Image (spheres, rainbow, N blue to C red):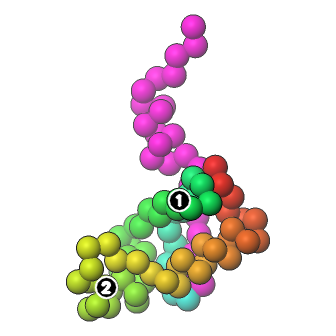
């Protein structure tokens, strides 16, 4: 029987399928994974969070889950051009 080690599964969950992507507006570099056409996961580094003007705005700091519309457009563009696919 071929068993996969739990750490391998955990690593796959945490890092598998992610690609590096830069925001077209501010060049903040994040890791993005599309698990389905509707579901997108974004891993923000502390550097990217500080670099993004949308995430550092007073309005965004008050929201429970701040988002960046410019990064969303960059992700949509990457999907349209094929540089980011559904994994």
Q: Residue furthest right?
A: 81
Q: Position of residue 28 (x, y in %)?
A: 49, 78
Q: Position of residue 58 (x, y in %)?
A: 26, 91
> Which stretch appears magenta?
1-24
Residue 61 highlighted magenta (yes or no): no
Which mark, residue 39?
1
Q: Earlier in the sequence, mark 2 or mark 1?
A: 1
Asked if residue 51 shows in the view, the reply is no
Q: Residue furthest front?
A: 38
Identified at 61% across, 78% down, the residue is 74
Asked whether 38 or 23 is in front, the reply is 38
Q: Is residue 33 above or below residue 46?
A: above
Residue behind mark 2: 60
Identified at 59% across, 81% down, the residue is 73
Q: Residue furthest left?
A: 62
SS label for mark 1 = loop
Give the mark toward the camera: 2 or 1: 1
**Label 1 neighbour load within 10 Å: few <14, some 14-19, many 20+:** few
Q: Is residue 38 above or below residue 15?
A: below
SS label for mark 2 = helix
């Amino acid at each position: 029987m071929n068993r996969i080690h739990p750490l391998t599964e955990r690593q796959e969950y945490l890092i598998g399928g992610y690609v590096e992507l830069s925001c077209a507006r501010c060049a903040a570099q994040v890791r993005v994974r599309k698990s389905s056409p509707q579901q997108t996961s974004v891993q923000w580094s502390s550097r990217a969070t500080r670099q993004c003007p949308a995430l550092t705005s007073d309005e965004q700091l008050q929201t429970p889950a701040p988002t960046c519309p410019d990064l969303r457009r960059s992700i949509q563009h990457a999907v349209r051009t094929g540089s980011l696919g559904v994994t």
